[in-house]
Image (cartoon, helix red, strand yellow):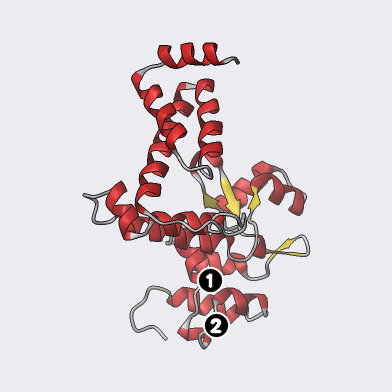
C-alpha cells in the first residue's frame, strides 16, 4: 500500500482506531511489531477487534508503569509466568485495577493454577488421551465424569488432563480410588491435593507416593483431606 492510500485509510478510520494507530507509532521499537500484527488481525471479526483493542490498551497501560527487562519475555517456556508476574506488580495493578482490592489475589490464583497444571509437563487434550488409552473421545469424557480421570476445564477450550496420571498407556494405578475419596471436591482442589506435600505422608506429595505404589496411604490421606484434626 502506498503512502497516499495509507493516509486516506487512517483519515477514514474511527477516532478509536486512529488513537490505536497513534499509540502503535509512538510505542517502543520492541513493542511496535507485536502491536502492528495485532492491529492487522482486528479487521477479521468484531469480537476479535474488541478483544485485541482491550489487550493493546492493557499492555500499553502496563508498559508505561512497569520497567520490563529485555530478557523478560524471550523464553517461551517461562513467558506466561513472566507476564503474570509483570501484571501482578503493584504499579501495574494500580494502572489496571485501581479500585479492585482483590486484583493481586486474582493474578496469584492464575499463577498457582498454571503451575499446578503445567508444572510437570504439558497436559494432554481429550483427543490425545483418547489416542493414548485407545478409546474414543466420548469414552474419555465419560471416565472424567465418573471420576476415573482428572480433567481440568478451560471453558470453551475443553479440558486438559495432567500427563502424569498415565503410565505405559494406562491410568496411574490407584488414581481412581484417590479421586473417589475426593469426589466432593472440584478438580482443581483434587489437583492441589495431589501436588501439595501432606503431613500424613511425611511431607511427601500424594502424587509422589502414588507413583511409588503407596496407594492405600494416599487413599487414606485423601479420605482425611479437609477434616480438621484428622491424622
Instruction: Measuring from the top left, give residue 215's x and y in whole percent.
Output: 62, 77
Please state which of residues 213 and 11 is positioned toward the viewer in this rendering: 11
Tell me the SS state at disc 1: helix
> For residue 54, what is the image quadrant?
top left
Tell me the SS state at disc 2: loop
Which residue, given by chain and number where applicable, does mark 2 sit on? 204
**In the orientation shown, which residue stands out farthest toward the bottom?**
202
Instruction: Measuring from the top left, give residue 148's x and y in whole percent.
Output: 60, 58
Please state which of residues 160 and 140 is positioned toward the viewer in this rendering: 160
Please state which of residues 16 and 185 is positioned toward the viewer in this rendering: 16
Q: Residue at (45%, 60%) from the top-left corner?
A: 111
Q: Residue at (59%, 14%) from the top-left corner?
A: 2
> For residue 224, what is the image quadrant?
bottom left
User: In the rendered image, which quarter contains the N terminus?
Assistant: top right
Q: Taking 93 as reference, is 53 above or below it?
A: above
User: In the rendered image, which quarter contains the C terminus?
Assistant: bottom left
| Residue 1 appears left or right of 11 | right
**In the orientation shown, which residue stands out farthest toward the left?**
99
Q: What crowding class fits label 2: few (fewer than 14 Cα within 10 Å), some (14-19), or many (20 or more)?
A: some
Instruction: Measuring from the top left, give residue 202's x and y in whole percent.
Output: 52, 88
Q: Taking 207 as reference, is 77 above or below it?
A: above
| Residue 13 appears left or right of 154 | left
**How many labels sit on residues?**
2
Q: How far is the residue under mark 2 from the one under mark 1?
A: 9 Å
**In the orientation shown, which residue stands out farthest toward the front?**
3
Q: Residue at (23%, 56%) from the top-left corner?
A: 101
Which residue, given by chain and number where applicable, does mark 1 sit on? 195
Q: Residue at (55%, 76%) from the top-left corner?
A: 206
| Numbered circle sitting on residue 108 | none
Marked residue nearer the N-terminal end (2 or 1): 1
Amino acid at each position: 500500500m502506498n503512502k497516499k492510500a495509507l493516509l486516506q485509510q487512517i483519515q477514514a478510520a474511527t477516532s478509536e482506531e486512529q488513537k490505536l494507530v497513534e499509540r502503535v507509532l509512538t510505542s517502543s521499537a520492541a513493542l511496535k511489531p507485536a502491536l502492528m500484527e495485532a492491529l492487522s488481525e482486528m479487521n477479521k471479526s468484531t469480537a476479535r477487534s474488541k478483544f485485541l483493542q482491550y489487550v493493546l490498551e492493557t499492555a500499553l497501560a502496563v508498559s508505561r508503569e512497569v520497567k520490563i527487562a529485555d530478557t523478560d519475555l524471550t523464553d517461551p517456556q517461562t513467558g506466561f509466568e513472566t507476564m503474570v508476574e509483570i501484571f501482578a506488580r503493584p504499579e501495574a495493578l494500580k494502572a489496571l485495577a485501581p479500585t479492585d482490592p482483590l486484583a493481586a489475589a486474582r493474578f496469584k490464583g492464575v499463577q498457582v493454577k498454571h503451575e499446578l497444571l503445567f508444572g510437570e509437563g504439558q497436559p494432554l487434550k481429550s483427543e490425545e488421551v483418547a489416542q493414548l488409552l485407545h478409546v474414543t473421545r466420548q469414552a474419555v469424557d465419560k471416565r472424567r465424569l465418573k471420576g476415573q480421570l482428572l480433567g481440568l476445564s478451560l471453558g470453551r477450550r475443553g479440558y486438559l488432563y495432567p500427563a502424569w496420571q498415565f503410565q505405559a498407556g494406562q491410568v496411574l494405578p490407584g488414581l481412581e480410588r484417590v479421586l473417589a475419596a475426593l469426589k466432593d471436591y472440584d478438580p482443581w482442589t483434587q489437583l492441589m491435593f495431589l501436588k501439595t506435600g501432606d503431613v500424613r505422608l511425611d511431607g511427601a506429595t500424594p502424587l509422589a507416593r502414588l507413583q511409588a505404589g503407596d496407594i492405600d496411604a494416599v487413599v487414606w490421606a485423601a479420605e482425611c483431606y479437609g477434616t480438621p484434626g484428622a491424622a
